[in-house]
Image (spheres, rainbow, N blue to C red):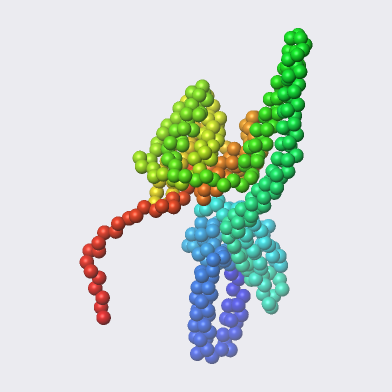
Amino acid sequence: MKSGFLEKLVARLDRVVPGDVQQVVTRLIREKGFLEKVFEALHEGVIILDPNGVIGFVNRAACQFFGLDVERALGAEISSQIRGLDWDSLGKPGRTISRDLEVFYPENRFLNFYLAPIDDAEDAGEPLGFVMLVRDLTVTRAEAEETLESERLNALTLLAAGVAHEIGNPLNSLDIHLQLLGRKLRKLPPGDRKPLEENLSTAREEIRRLDMILKQFLHAVRPTTPHRERTDLHAVLHETLKLLEPELAARKISVRLDLAESMPPVTVDPGQFQQAFYNVIRNASQAVSGEGGSITLRTRVTDFEYVISIEDNGTGISPEHMGAIFEPYRTTKSSGSGLGLLIVRRIIREHGGEIEIESRENEGTRVLIHLPRLERAVRLLGPPESDPVIDL
């Protein structure tokens, strides 16, 4: 910090009685300690800089946000301590800056910093220094994203009602008229009937495909009530693997099971969970290419939750696609509706759980399904070593 105040104080020492000098110094020390305690108590980060961007003070919160070491940070330029901050473009006299930034170390956080000059009341030129206030917007940003997602799903739900009426009814009508055409075609000579039957078959297949897309869309966005019952998740996993066994065998994909020895029943909708497991395992199989592909299924249970892990050694998901994997109709596959993971997340969340996805490009993907365990295990605590002694 520029020592303008101290220089002025020293210049006036010859006019101050010696006893008053000690009182002034004692008061400065006391006020400095008080201000440091105030800054350390704040949840916002506080960084005091000199005109050249050299750190003169940094509180505990700022150190946690940016992973700074106090001893190394003090006396160092801020650009060398916080990567991505260019002091030459920030530290301009008379200019206040408010900017958002994302940091990845020591934790992934979204921050906002407010940089303001500390002006000298007697000198309108160069400021005494700068103060930087840093706020953590991670939770606020997450809440805003949840609100936006809820609004998006509500809009999709309203759209689904219109889609069901405007598209579903014409599809049913088309299917009925195609059946009538099929009956009339049977009365034609075989030579004239064959090319028309091929066209009719194509039209029917397209109607079935549209009907399937419509049902997937409605199921993805329309609220449903799970029919809960005590279910063995391991049994649901085995049933799902039986459905996918021909496809996995044809592609020579090996499946490894690492299941918990004891998995208490969980109260869920078994049909919905079979659909969720089917979508995730099938996505994993489609991500595996060539021989040597494998999928590993793991389960574990704690006092608080059930965890189901589905991991593959496939192509993985690129960083630019990770942020949009739950958006409807976002897919990297040539033949996919982009609704699979949206349906899975809706099923998991309707049961009070959460889905987590970890992926590295060209290495593989792991999907973790967390389900809360409502029935907590009872732990017997051992007796105390001795009776407590109370001094009166």
Query: In this picture, is 19 found above or below 308?
Result: below
Please name the residue shown 39% across and 43% down the image: 263
Residue 291 image offset from top left, x and y in percent = 49, 23
Classify residue 274 as left or right of residue 335: left
Query: In this picture, is 133 found above or below 285?
Result: below
Please name the residue shown 70% across and 21% down the image: 201
Q: Which quadrant, please, contains the C terminus?
A: bottom left
Please name the residue shown 71% across and 71% down the image: 125
Q: In front here: 363 or 90?
A: 363
Residue 165 image offset from top left, x and y in percent = 73, 40
Query: In this picture, is 89 found above or below 258?
Result: below
Residue 326 image offset from top left, x and y in percent = 61, 43
Q: In front here: 303 or 315?
A: 303
Please name the residue shown 44% across and 50% down the image: 373
Residue 153 image offset from top left, x and y in percent = 65, 48
Classify residue 63 as left or right of residue 222: left
The answer to whether residue 316 of the structure is visible from this angle is no
The image quarter containing residue 232 is top left
